[in-house]
């Protein structure tokens, strides 16, 4: 039941993020939304660049740590965060000085990156401490603040900076709510901070984060290439930005939920008993990830056209629908390249492999997108080719995962694939009148719940074959 609540909390976060995008896109002009989307993407890139290494290290080291050692590791985590934030406050303004960004926009982007990263780090500590319900509830509070304050900011200010100010206030509220729940999360003792712990965090986390930076750099590069090709002020760019913002977010939220409810158990088993003990839990995690993401991709392709006309501004709707399937496919393959293919690599702490995978994606996909756009190809065709290249690269780099021997049970995998095909087929059926659309949604939800129940993904132990 706890895992179900956690997944529901992540689902709420996804819906809130979608609501935020819809709200801001309707409250500001198309050109202002494009600017808002690019600045938020840049802020996320900054957060990954400065703090992702620490969240990765905290998840891996705290998950398998004995109870007596966790507090010492937490002190080291807080010290490392403070050092990263200080470095960002020094380097960030210098970097933005050489860009065209306004000072207020740059300051808000830095503030959002720092506040969001601190909130994420505190929630990560709660999750690996097995307080899943509390972390999910606090994440729901933060998501509610985010969509509310950003929408109010966009409504009052009518521009990207006002919406960013609302996002910053929401992240601060998220940190405050988490500390109100447990003030000991910020407890720090200098004598508990050792060079060996900081070195272990840095050695492992920074290499893994370098891979995350490259992955995100590839995504940000694609956005700038396509927006530059379409024109930043065009409705086509606004439609593309909406699709990129809306259709990738559910995958990242869902995978984060699955990873957080399952990976700490996998890491603890591997640290305690090695590969033999971790194989069944890892295989179950792989099946869980595949079934959830394939069902999500099928549902989004099937139902996005039914809801887009309700929420997407009319001027941006044709461009949105043109790229939506390609963006969904790209999000699906990116998820498995960056998460599923990295599970075993994280267990083995082979962070050099993560860098190789990420660098290959950056090397192949960005020039491919540029070439297609330079040949006057459409944004959709460029994204389809990028997604296919990402899929092929992921398969080529799957050797460590195959060698680990954690083979998902055939039954849940086949059931997930069959349910995904059935959900995808629902998109071919008419959606009018409204009761018919509701019936289709109920059927899709029932198929998803059946797969989760039959695969025993929300239970302890191994999924049945």
Image (tube, helix red, strand yellow):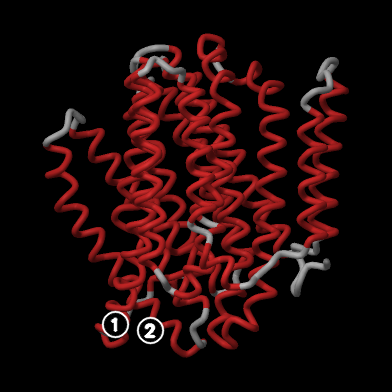
**Dot 2: within a 10 Å radius of its alpha carbon, few (fewer than 14), some, or many (20 or more) residues?**
some
Residue drawn at (67%, 33%), measured in percent from left and top?
300
| Residue 440: percent from left, percent from top | 84, 30
x and y percent of residue 91 in the render?
Answer: 15, 51
The residue tagged with tag 1: helix, strand or loop?
Answer: loop
Do labels 2 and 1 touch, CB within 8 Å? Answer: yes
Kindly identify which residue carries mark 2: 72
The furthest residue to the top: 315
Locate residue 122 relative to residue 48 in the image: left or right.
Answer: right
Seen at 51% across and 36% down, the residue is 148
Residue 153 percent coordinates (x, y)? 41, 29
| Direction bottom: furthest residue | 68
**Distance (Cα) linking label 2 and label 1:** 7 Å
Seen at 39% across and 80% down, the residue is 73
Horizontal side, residue 461 vs residue 394: left or right: right
Residue 340 shows in this picture: yes
Sequence-first tag of 2 and 1: 2
Residue 193 - label: 1
Q: Is residue 157 visible?
A: no
Point out the image quarter for the N terminus.
Answer: bottom right
Number of residues whose C-alpha sits closer than 10 Å to that of mark 1, classed few (under 14), some (14–19) or many (20 or more):
many
- In terms of secondary structure, where does tag 2 sit? helix
Give x and y (percent) for residue 137: 61, 57
Of residues 2 and 272, the one nearer the viewer is: 272
Residue 236 located left or right of residue 435: left
Q: Give the quadrant of the C terminus.
A: bottom right
């Amino acid at each position: 039941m706890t895992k179900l609540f956690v997944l529901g909390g992540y689902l709420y976060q996804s819906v809130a993020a979608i609501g935020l995008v819809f709200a801001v896109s309707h409250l500001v002009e198309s050109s202002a939304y494009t600017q808002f989307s690019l600045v938020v993407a840049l802020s996320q890139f900054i957060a990954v660049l400065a703090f992702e290494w620490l969240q990765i290290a905290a998840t891996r080291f705290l998950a398998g740590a004995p109870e007596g050692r966790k507090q010492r590791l937490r002190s080291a985590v807080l010290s490392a965060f403070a050092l990263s934030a200080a470095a960002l406050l020094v380097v960030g303004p210098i970097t933005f000085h050489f860009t065209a960004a306004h000072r207020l926009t740059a300051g808000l982007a830095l503030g959002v990156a720092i506040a969001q990263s601190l909130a994420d780090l505190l929630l990560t500590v709660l999750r690996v401490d097995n307080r899943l319900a509390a972390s999910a509830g606090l994440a729901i509070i933060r998501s509610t603040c985010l969509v509310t304050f950003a929408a109010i900011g966009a409504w009052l200010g009518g521009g990207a900076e006002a919406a960013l100010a609302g996002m910053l206030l929401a992240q601060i509220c998220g940190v405050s709510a988490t500390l109100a729940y447990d003030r000991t999360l910020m407890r720090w003792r200098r004598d508990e901070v050792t060079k060996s712990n900081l070195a272990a965090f840095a050695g492992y986390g920074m290499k893994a984060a370098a891979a995350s930076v490259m992955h995100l750099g590839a995504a940000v590069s694609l956005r700038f290439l396509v927006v530059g090709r379409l024109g930043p002020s065009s409705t086509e760019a606004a439609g593309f930005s909406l699709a990129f913002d809306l259709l990738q977010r559910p995958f990242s939220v869902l995978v984060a939920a699955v990873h957080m409810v399952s990976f700490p158990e996998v890491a603890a088993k591997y640290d305690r008993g090695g590969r033999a003990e971790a194989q069944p839990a890892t295989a179950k995690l792989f099946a869980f990830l595949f079934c959830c993401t394939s069902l999500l991709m099928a549902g989004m392709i099937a139902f996005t056209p039914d809801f887009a006309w309700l929420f997407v501004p009319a001027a941006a709707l044709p461009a949105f629908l043109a790229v939506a399937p390609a963006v969904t496919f790209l999000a699906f393959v990116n998820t498995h390249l960056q998460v599923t293919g990295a599970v075993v690599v994280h267990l083995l702490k082979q962070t050099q492999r993560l860098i190789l995978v990420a660098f290959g994606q950056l090397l192949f996909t960005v020039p491919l997108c540029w070439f297609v756009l330079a040949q006057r190809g459409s944004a959709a065709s460029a994204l389809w080719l990028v997604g296919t290249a990402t899929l092929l690269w992921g398969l080529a780099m799957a050797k460590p995962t195959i060698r680990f021997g954690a083979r998902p049970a055939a039954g849940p995998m086949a059931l997930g694939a069959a349910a995904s095909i059935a959900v995808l087929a629902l998109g071919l059926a008419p959606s009018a009148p409204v009761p018919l659309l509701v019936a289709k949604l109920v059927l899709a939800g029932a198929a998803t719940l059946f797969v989760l129940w039959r695969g025993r993904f929300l239970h302890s132990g191994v999924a049945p074959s």
